[in-house]
Amino acid sequence: MIYVSRLEHFNAAHKLYNPKWSEEKNKEVFGPCANTNWHGHNFELIVTVKGKPNPDTGFVIDLKKLSTLIRKHVIEQVDHKNLNMDVPFMAGKLASTENLVMEFWKILEPRIAELSENEAKLHSLKLYETPRNFVEYFGE
Ligand code: NI
C-alpha cells in the first residue's frame, strides 16, 4: 500500500464561541479565540490517499485531479470566508479545527473513491490551524 499526499492552503476567519455559555465562560474557555469580532488563520490541509499504483500510470491517484477536486469542493467553500457565518456545512457547529476536518472528510471521502474508480481511498486529513496546532483525522 502506498500513501500519497497533497497539501492545499486557505485563509479563513472564525471565532470559538458556545452560545449556551455566558460571555465570561466563553472568554475563560476559548481565550482570545472567543474574540467577538473574529480572527483569522492560515490553514494548511494535507490530504492523504492510499492505494496501489495503477499498472498503466504508476500512480495511486492523479495528484493534479486530486488537487482540482480538493480545491473545488473544500478550498473554494472556505477560503477567505468566515467559518461561523459563510460556510453552510459549518452552520450551527462550533468552528473548531476538529469539527472542520470532520466536515471535510464527509465531502472528500466519496469523491476521492469516485475519482479513482474505487482504486484509492482517503486515508487521513491533517489540518493545521497554526504551525504548532493541528488535528489529524482518519474517518472515525
Ligand atoms: Ni482561532
Image (cartoon, rainbow, N blue to C red):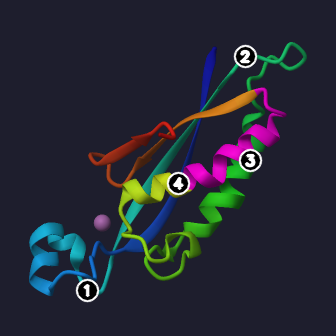
The magenta stretch is: 104-119
Residue 115 counted in the magenta span:
yes
Q: Please tell me which of labels 4 and 3 falls first in the chain.
A: 4
Left or right side of 136 for 131 = left
Amino acid type at image mark 4: His
Residue 52 shows which numbered tag? 2
Is label 1 in contact with label 2 (beta carbons under 8 Å)?
Answer: no
Query: How far apart in space, not on screen, are marks 3 and 1 (Cα)?
Result: 36 Å
The residue shown at (25%, 86%) is: 36
Query: Badge 3 local density, few (<14 within 10 Å), some, or many (20+)?
Result: some
Residue under circle 4? 9
For the N terminus, the image quarter is top right
- Judge by depth and name the residue closer to the eye, 93 or 45: 93
Q: Please tell me which of labels 4 and 1 falls first in the chain.
A: 4
Query: How far apart in space, not on screen, are marks 1 and 2 (Cα)?
Result: 48 Å
Q: Is mark 1 on a helix, strand or loop?
A: loop
Query: Badge 2 local density, few (<14 within 10 Å), some, or many (20+)?
Result: some
Amino acid type at image mark 2: Lys
Instruction: State yes or no: Cβ of the residue under disc 4 lies below 8 Å from any atom of ligand 1.
Output: no
Q: Vertically, is 7 above or below 74? A: above
Residue under circle 3? 111
Is label 4 in contact with label 3 (beta carbons under 8 Å)?
Answer: no
Is label 4 in contact with label 1 (beta carbons under 8 Å)?
Answer: no
Question: Which secondary structure class fits the magenta region best?
Answer: helix
Query: Badge 1 local density, few (<14 within 10 Å), some, or many (20+)?
Result: few
Query: How far apart in space, not on screen, are marks 2 and 4 (Cα)?
Result: 27 Å
Residue 118, position in %: x, y?
A: 79, 31
Amino acid type at image mark 1: Thr
The residue shown at (42%, 59%) is: 99
Residue under circle 1? 36
